[in-house]
Amino acid sequence: MTTSTTLSPDFKITLPRDLCARLGWVPGQDFIFLPKPGGVLILPVSSLDELKGIATGASARDFRER
């Protein structure tokens, strides 16, 4: 899927509806912008419920920042 959009004079970008639907993005959702060489990576911010349990079974034995 290739789509394009234009940066508005007040620095807003409208995301294509079909792209948002395909990715499961909804109005009001929060995003983070990570600068990359030559562009930016846009990622949805995960909720605490989505993050719960991601470190289950991880060992803190060799954790560097005790």
Image (tube, rainbow, N blue to C red):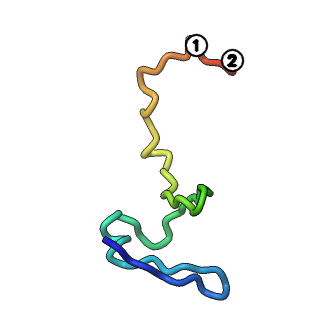
Badge 1 is on which residue?
62
In which quadrant of the rendered image does the N terminus lie? bottom left
Q: Residue at x 69, y 17 (%)?
A: 66
Q: Secondary structure at mark 2?
A: loop
Which numbered circle lies on residue 19?
A: none
- For disc 1, the neighbor class at 10 Å (few under 14, some 14 to 19, many from 20) is few
* Three-letter amino acid code at the position of disc 2: Arg
Location of residue 3 in the rendering, given as x and y in whole percent from the top left corner: 38, 77
* Three-letter amino acid code at the position of disc 1: Asp
Q: Residue at x 42, y 46 (%)?
A: 50
> Observer-nearest residue: 35 or 30?
35
Q: Is residue 2 above or below residue 52?
A: below
Quadrant housing residue 57: top left
Location of residue 38 in the rendering, given as x and y in whole percent from the top left corner: 59, 62
Q: Residue at x 67, y 85 (%)?
A: 10
Quadrant housing residue 22: bottom left
Which numbered circle lies on residue 66?
A: 2
Q: Residue at x 45, y 76 (%)?
A: 15
Location of residue 39 in the rendering, given as x and y in whole percent from the top left corner: 57, 63
> Observer-nearest residue: 50 or 60?
60
> Observer-nearest residue: 37 or 12?
37
Q: Secondary structure at mark 1?
A: loop
Disc 2 from disc 1: Cα separation: 9 Å
The reply, left or right, for residue 35 in relation to residue 21 is: right
Q: Is residue 42 above or below residue 53?
A: below
- For disc 2, the neighbor class at 10 Å (few under 14, some 14 to 19, many from 20) is few
Location of residue 60 in the rendering, given as x and y in whole percent from the top left corner: 55, 16
